[in-house]
Image (spheres, grey):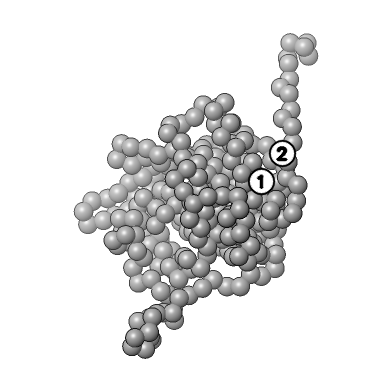
């Protein structure tokens, strides 16, 4: 299981689930309804479940993949690559213990590759991870961003535990919000630290929403960054996300100019 939600405890759960979903991260019992081996005639391959067709303002997979192929790098996947595993993955996520417990809905929702009601496409390489989420309408897209922002504030530090026969796996996640300027309808920037067995991984990412479309771009960093360094990364990631979002929506999303800081001495 790879981290696909990018900015949230998806990476936390990815670390945990890799140890409990079988060799190579395969989801046990994958296939869902309608894909049971007994339903397949001898000599034929099992049917592959695919995601629903786009509804409302949703884009189709070809549109999202084309935008990623043009503006991002790395391997590209979409909702269809994960759809048949979603039910089993949801079951596995419910077995995680989260401290504080009120953060569990946030952790489990964020760990799913595709948010509820959305279709998605992803581009991943070693240096950057990009996701496009397309929702039926603007309200659904904004609800997703609002939930991410609210949960980051309420669950800025939490621990996820997976019980295994060979011993528990425990991962602690710390999330802090960063300043971001964007011309998109809504935006969010986060810095994340994921710790396990004395080692840590660090990530900075941004989420932009315009109309019913959301783009998220994240980048691993070697260590927690100071304010100025983090700001530079956020500017770069915002530009990358905005370019894709402009392609998807046809909008001009240039960020506003930063406001000068007030000079208290001059004011006096």
Return the residue found at the far front: 70
- For disc 2, the marked residue is 255
Q: Residue at x 52, y 53 (%)?
A: 123
**147 or 138, nearer to the observer:** 138
Q: Residue at x 35, y 52 (%)?
A: 16
Determine which of the numbered discs, if any, sits on residue 13 in the image. Answer: none
Q: In which quarter of the image is residue 158?
A: top left
**245 or 56, nearer to the observer:** 245
Horizontal side of 7 relative to 22 (left or right) equals right
Label 1 to label 2: alpha-carbon separation: 9 Å
- Give coordinates of residue 66: x percent, y percent: 61, 59
Q: Is mark 1 on a helix, strand or loop?
A: helix
- For disc 1, the marked residue is 242
- Give coordinates of residue 38: x percent, y percent: 34, 85
Q: What element carries label 2?
A: loop
Q: Which residue is drawn at 46% across and 65% down?
A: 82
Assess disc 2: are there few (<14), some (14-19) or many (≥20) residues with their C-alpha within 10 Å of its C-alpha.
Answer: some
Q: In this view, does 200 lie above or below 4?
A: above
Horizontal side of 166 relative to 232 (left or right) equals left
Q: Can residue 100 be seen in this view?
A: no
């Amino acid at each position: 299981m790879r981290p696909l939600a990018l900015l949230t405890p998806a990476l936390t759960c990815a670390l945990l689930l890799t140890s409990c979903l079988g060799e190579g991260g395969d989801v046990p019992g994958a296939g869902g309804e309608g894909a049971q081996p007994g339903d397949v005639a001898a000599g034929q391959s099992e049917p592959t479940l695919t995601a629903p067709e786009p509804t409302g303002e949703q884009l189709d997979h070809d549109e999202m993949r084309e935008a990623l192929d043009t503006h991002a790098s790395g391997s590209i996947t979409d909702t269809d690559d994960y759809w048949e595993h979603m039910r089993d993955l949801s079951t596995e996520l419910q077995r995680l213990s989260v401290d504080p417990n009120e953060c569990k809905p946030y952790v489990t929702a964020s760990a799913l590759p595709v948010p509820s009601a959305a279709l998605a496409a992803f581009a991943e390489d070693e240096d950057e991870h990009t996701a496009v989420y397309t929702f039926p309408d603007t309200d659904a897209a904004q609800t997703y961003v609002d939930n991410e922002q609210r949960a980051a504030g309420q669950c800025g530090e939490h621990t996820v535990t997976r019980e295994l026969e060979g011993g528990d796996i425990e991962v602690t996640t710390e999330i802090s919000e960063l300043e971001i300027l964007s011309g998109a309808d809504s935006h969010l920037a986060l810095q994340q630290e994921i710790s396990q067995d004395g080692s840590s991984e660090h990530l900075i990412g941004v989420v932009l929403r315009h109309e019913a479309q959301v783009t998220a771009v994240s980048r691993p960093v070697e260590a927690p960054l100071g304010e100025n360094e983090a700001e530079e990364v956020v500017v770069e990631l915002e530009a990358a996300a905005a370019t894709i979002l402009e392609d998807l929506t046809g909008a001009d999303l240039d960020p506003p100019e930063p406001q000068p800081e007030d000079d208290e001495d001059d004011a006096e």
